[in-house]
Each structure stands twice: as structure tokens, then as C-alpha cells.
Image: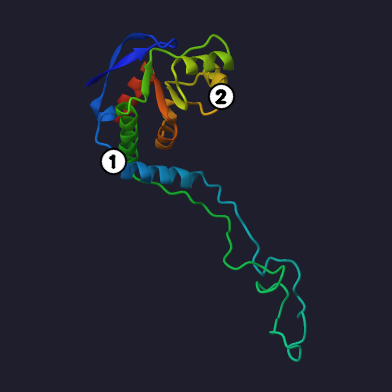
């Protein structure tokens, strides 16, 4: 197990903590990260795009002009896809884009993403992350003190004060351990965990 410095919100070192090699120093598998991120983005799609086909477009009951003698191609309805205002052919319809990858793949991809952040020196561990009251200014001060640009904070359990303090700061996101995912880890430049969150993640992923 490797040792990682533990910092306080002022950026000062207050101790060290051992991190599991099985979670934070494993073999990185980029193809699994790609597969899981692709799945997450597909699952976020609303799938509500819809166009009308020729049977759904209003009108078109009458033949637009006679069959012969006009010099034009024959038409049976003004709602044909060939006509202005006609229906669409093979257009999008509401559908579900969701699919799943195996649980072992998701866990392996998550370990790979955590390893990427740890080995790239873009992971910080805090002894605790607490605020007395909701304050965007105070939380932004913590971000600047720790020299973070686009951080993802991981906390052990729901903390309404911390979450509300950070929600209006651009490029800053707070997640509980239960919501940890590959896409957000890769999307943010730095990963910041509390010691309690670190232990909970190891408990779940090291097995």
C-alpha cells in the first residue's frame, strides 16, 4: 500500500493515509473506461426526438392534381415525403437508448479511473470537508487555497451545507460515495476525497 498525504482545508499536511493498491494503483484499462463512459452518456440521452410520418401529417386526403396531362409526376397525396409539408421517412421516434455493461466491467473501469487520478498526482485527500453555514465564498476559498481548477469532491454522506455552497461555482461538483462514477472522474481535472470517503470507496471496490 502506498502512502498519500492528508491535507486540511488550508492546504497544510496533517498526516498520511495508506491507499489500497487494488483500487488506486491497479492496471489501467482504457478500453473499459471508454466502454463505461459511452454507456453513461447513452443512458443520459432523453430519446424524445420525434417527427411526423405521412400518416401523421395533417391533410392530404384529396389527390393534389389529376393523374395525367399535367406534365408532372403523378401524386396521390400532398402529404407524401416528396411534397413540401409532407411527412418524414425513417425520422426519429421516441426510444430508449439505455443499455448496461457487466458489473465487473463497471467496477474495473472505476478502479482504472481512480488509478489514473492517483498516479497523475491529481488526487488530494482531506481530513474533513465541513462548513459552519452555507457560503459559496468560503467554499470557493477552499478551492483556491488547494489550487484546484476543475475539481470533483467526493464526500462520504449527504451534506446539504457543502453541496449548496459549491453548486454555484463553475466546474466544481460534489458527489457522495454512492454516486461515484467513471464519467465524472475523467471529466474533472482533480479528484478530492475525504478520508472517510476514501475508506468507504476502498471497502466497496477492493473486494
Element under disc 1: loop
Q: Is residue 206 visible?
A: no
Q: Secondary structure at mark 2?
A: loop
Within 10 Å of disc 1 (Cα), the crowding (few <14, some 14-19, many 20+) is some
Residue 50, position in %: x, y?
A: 62, 57
Q: Report the residue marked by disc 2.
A: 169
User: Picture coordinates of residue 198 (x, y %)?
Assistant: 35, 21
Quadrant for residue 17, please give it: top left
The color scheme shown is rainbow
The residue positioned 76% from the left and 88% from the top of the image is 70
Q: Quadrant of the N terminus?
A: top left
Q: Residue at x 33, y 36 (%)?
A: 107
Describe residue 44's horizontal placement relative to residue 74 as left or right: left
The residue that mark 1 highlights is 29
Q: Position of residue 150 (x, y in %)?
A: 47, 27
Label 2 packing within 10 angstroms: few (<14), some (14-19), many (20+): some
Circles 2 and 1: CB distance less than 8 Å? no
Give whichever of discs 2 and 1 has the lower sequence position.
1
Q: Does residue 162 appear left or right of residue 126 in this picture?
A: right
Query: How far apart in space, not on screen, are marks 2 and 1 (Cα)?
Result: 32 Å
Q: Is residue 170 at all visible to an observer of this figure?
A: yes
The single residue placed furthest to the left in the displayed view is 1
Residue 12, picture quadrant: top left
Query: How many numbered dots are placed on residues in this image?
Result: 2
Amino acid at each position: 500500500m502506498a502512502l498519500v498525504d492528508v491535507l486540511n482545508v488550508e492546504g497544510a499536511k496533517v498526516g498520511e493515509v495508506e491507499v489500497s493498491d487494488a483500487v488506486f494503483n491497479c492496471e489501467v484499462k482504457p478500453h473499459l473506461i471508454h466502454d463505461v463512459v459511452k454507456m453513461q452518456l447513452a443512458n443520459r440521452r432523453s430519446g424524445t426526438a420525434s417527427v411526423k410520418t405521412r400518416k401523421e401529417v395533417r391533410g392530404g386526403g384529396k389527390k393534389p392534381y389529376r393523374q395525367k396531362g399535367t406534365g408532372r409526376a403523378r401524386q396521390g397525396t400532398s402529404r407524401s415525403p416528396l411534397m413540401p409539408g409532407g411527412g418524414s421517412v425513417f425520422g426519429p421516434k421516441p426510444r430508449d437508448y439505455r443499455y448496461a455493461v457487466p458489473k465487473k466491467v463497471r467496477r474495473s473501469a472505476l478502479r482504472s479511473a481512480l488509478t489514473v487520478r492517483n498516479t497523475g498526482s491529481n488526487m488530494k485527500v482531506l481530513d474533513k470537508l465541513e462548513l459552519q453555514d452555507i457560503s459559496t465564498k468560503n467554499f470557493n476559498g477552499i478551492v483556491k487555497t488547494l489550487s484546484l481548477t476543475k475539481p470533483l469532491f467526493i464526500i462520504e454522506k449527504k451534506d446539504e451545507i457543502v453541496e449548496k455552497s459549491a453548486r454555484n461555482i463553475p466546474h466544481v461538483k460534489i458527489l457522495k460515495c454512492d454516486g461515484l462514477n467513471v464519467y465524472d472522474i475523467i471529466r474533472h481535472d482533480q479528484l478530492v476525497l475525504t478520508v472517510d470517503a476514501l475508506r468507504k470507496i476502498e471497502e466497496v471496490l477492493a473486494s
